[in-house]
Amino acid sequence: GYPHYNIKKLDDNKWVIELALAGFSKKDIDIEVKDNVMIINGELTGEEKDYVYKGISSRKFSKSFTLAEFTECESATMENGILSIVLEKNIPEDKKPQKVKIK
């Protein structure tokens, strides 16, 4: 599927999704998280050029990722045609496993 992407594990509770989006800018991309699903939409805006050859795709896309419970989008950056989205799992204290001391 287009666009191509990587998922890197940074630590036990943090990941980064990298999408290859050559030709796109920040204003061409929309990221939305709802009900544990992150949806990334992209559409190039601007005038069409008179290409002799066009090998870099610029089509409209929608990519979705199902997020684990308590996973939040920490940040998103766009650099050198790569959209990087950092995700972090933040489990509330009352949901974490607790040790019970035997007396």
Image (cartoon, rainbow, N blue to C red):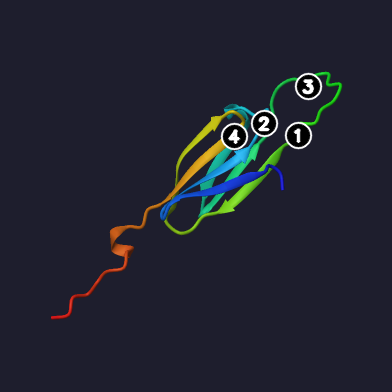
The label shown at residue 57 is 1
Label 1: how many residues lie within 10 Å, few (<14), some (14-19) or many (20+)?
few
Q: CA distance from mark 2 to mark 3?
A: 16 Å
Helix or strand or loop: what does disc 4 sit on?
Answer: strand
Helix or strand or loop: what does disc 1 sit on?
Answer: loop
Residue at x 75% of width, y 20% of height? 47
Q: CA distance from mark 1 to mark 4?
A: 14 Å
Helix or strand or loop: what does disc 2 sit on?
Answer: loop
Mark 2, residue position: 22
> Could you tell me the amino acid type at mark 2?
Ala
Mark 4, residue position: 82
- Residue 35 position, x and y percent, is 51, 54
Residue at x 68% of width, y 27% of height? 23
> Could you tell me the amino acid type at mark 3?
Glu
Relative horizontal placement of residue 52, taking residue 17 as reference (left or right): right
Label 3: how many residues lie within 10 Å, few (<14), some (14-19) or many (20+)?
few
